Image (spheres, coloured by chain):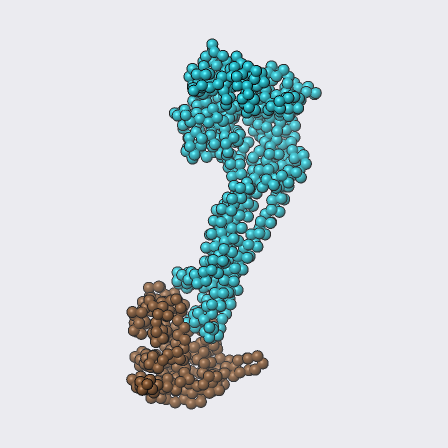
Amino acid sequence: MSIISLQGLKKTYKLGDNIVQALAGVTLDIDQGEFVAITGPSGSGKSTMMHILGCLDRPTEGKYLLNGKDVSSLGRDELADIRNKQIGFVFQGFNLLPRTTAVENVEVPLLYTRPVMPAAERRERAMKALTAMGLQDRYDHHPNQLSGGQQQRVAIARALVNEPTLILADEPTGNLDTKTSVEVMRILQELREEKGITIVLITHEPDIAAYGTRIIAVRDGKILSDEPNRPRSTLEMAPEQIMVTAN
Amino acid sequence: MLPGRHFILLAFNALLRNRMQTALAMIGVMVGVAALVTSLALGRGAQESVEDQLRAAGANLIVVTAGNYAKGKEERSDPDGNIGHTGALSPRDLVPMSPLGARLEQVALVAQPFRVFTDRMAPQGPQILYPMPYGYVTSDGAMAQPQRNPAEALLVPSHFEDDPLAIHDHPTAKDRLGDVSAGLGSAATLTADDAKAVAQLAGVQHVVAGVHENARIFVAEDKTKQWFTRYHGTEWALPELRSGWSMIHGRFLSKEDADEKAQVMVLGKVVADRLFGEGVNPVGKTTTMWNQPFKVIGVLSSRSWASSPVPGDDQFDAVYVPVSTIDGLLNLSKLNTISLSAKSVGDVSRLATEVKLLLRKRHGIGEETPDDFTVTTMAQQAIGKGIPPQLARVIAGNLQDVDRLTIEQMSASLKKTNVIMLIMLAGVATISLLVGGIGVMNLLLLSVTQRTREVGLRIALGARRSDIATQFVLEALLLCIIGGVLGILAGVLASGGLQRFFEWSAVISPMSAIVSLIVAALLGIVFSVYPARRAALLDPIEALRHE
């Protein structure tokens, strides 16, 4: 069953007098348990696609069915609830709250879950998500006391805490070194393999896209290619790492 | 709703993030609320002054006093310029005979009107005249200087307590003065029958006959505790005339006390404090006056802060005893005062005139002869009560013939002045609150800008717009409630200060504190609407890109 179904999706912006077409008709189905990497240069429309997939933006035209439900016509509060429960976000800049402990960061989505979740349950679920990321010992660390990889793992824990069916990762490795990037990609692969979570990854790096089971190339608001992929193993050495080792 | 405790903590943390700005905004709110509390207190104080104190403190009160001070002062030429006295002796008579003549001059200035007492306990000895601070004047003309024990010098065998039930012959004014006008209150021209006659006049509410004199009051069980004050022989209805009074302990004199000629005493607060200690309830204790025991049945104080009891005043530095009891002990024939209240406050001037005519008739005073009593209405005194003295002066200056005004006219005029004052105060409070509110808004806008990225993140993670707005409103609310509580405290202090140092009447009610807190909360809500809306309407995509 397809978890995501885009049908003739268009998005236009008005920039002054110019009308910019960010998405020029995208039709696409993503099945449960896929690891889709969407690639493309900046300005290709992949970010706009990501925002619409994440229910942060609405298409100008076309339909977006999430879990079979047309979300392109939903109101703001309903979209907020969908983001809260069905989608987990992983951002490039981690976007952890400063001066806030790891476990409290993980709890943030639960604060907006309706009906209201008791504090004890919030803490319990956040700790469980942190443990899954191997960060149970660091629960009371502030983001500035954690390494980049650890911060991104906290962010993934936050994305997982409400047990979503879809994880949207927007350049999740953009701020990480290669070794840590591989680590993060391994986590995403494991989530897919062990929990069957659908993952949509946005990246402009072919190396990173190679970890997906399917690679979609976007250019000028259209799908350029859509190919299944034999996912690259995280056990393999990335070329950059060989270089580093050689030095 | 959202998990409340978490978001309150969140708001706290947000406030702590910009400590300086938070403190400044909080001071703004505090000043605004303090101004509001103060103006409410002053407004209420002024209102109480006009509507209550003006009437209660005796605007409907007429006091008839024996003697006619005004006329007496005019007619008696006193080359030494001494304070008028009316007794059988004058200080000047004593000076040549006295070894303490030089001092006696000073004594005369402070002495009460001379009264002649005889010492029943020592009939063979010289008569004792009134005791004075520097010694004792005896009837053979000598000034006895107290030795180590003043009692020895006095030849009084028992106790220092002055005036053992002497023969209190109040001679008639005619006898005493040979038709000379007498000083206020000291002449003996009013009688109990006069009081009864006055009570028959139309429009009279209460009549209280009274005598008063200075006396030394002792604590019965500890005679080292004493206080020289004034006693009032009076009647049960006196508090009806002085509704500015309140009993802080016990009760006032009753009709039964009068009927039984009971030796009971109501203490003014000043006396109670001096004799029994501040705040002690002396009801049930015993005092003595002229070596006679009096049971304390109540303590009297003022209902208003504006006329708080002070030593030396005539109301609370005084004791009250049934006039019938005094009569029984001293065999009075004359009264010092007849106080009466008018049923209608507008009726005071007419009633005062009628009382005057009635008494002149009863006293058989001819057309050419001045009154041998003085009728005073309290309007003039009342007008200055409880409002800023400067203001009172202006009003008094602008009101010609104040006694002829009806109380309605007077209170209308005062109210008008008060309304102007209140509008000004309300204006100051409003402007302060506005400034405080702008401070709050400024802080919140700063907070929204600083936390744009955070807001974007929260929206992305599933916060509804209302959740975001609530968070900022909560922040303002918290700030304003803390500022409001501080402002109420500051307002209480400010009102107390105005009261104390400028004698403005300020009354803080719990209601005005609650109202102020609500106003502070509303201030927070109103001035956070714009920043909260701005935060809630942030585009999460843009906000997440914000640095």
Q: Residue furthest right?
A: B368
Q: State the image coordinates of residue B265 (x, y, percent, origin top left).
A: 46, 26
Give residue B172's quadrant in the image: top right
Q: Which chain is brown?
A: A
Q: Residue at x 45, y 16 (%)?
A: B153
What is the count of numbered marks? 0
Give residue A233's quadrant in the image: bottom left
Q: Is residue A168 above or below residue B208?
A: below
Q: Is residue A17 above or below residue B51?
A: below
Write down the colour of chain B: cyan
User: Can you say which quadrant of the picture contains the N terminus of chain B?
Assistant: bottom left
Q: Residue furthest top?
A: B124
Q: State the image coordinates of residue B121 (x, y, percent, origin top left).
A: 45, 13
Q: State the image coordinates of residue B82 (x, y, percent, origin top left).
A: 60, 23
Q: State the image coordinates of residue B305 (x, y, percent, origin top left).
A: 51, 39
Q: Is residue B267 above or below residue A114?
A: above
Q: Residue at x 58, y 49 (%)?
A: B425
Q: In front: A110, or B403?
A: B403
Q: Residue at x 47, y 32 (%)?
A: B269
Residue B35 falls left or right of residue A167: right
Query: In this orientation, does residue A86 appear?
Result: no
Residue B92 falls left or right of residue B316: right
Q: Residue at x 41, y 83 (%)?
A: A203
Query: In this orientation, does residue B207 appear?
Result: yes
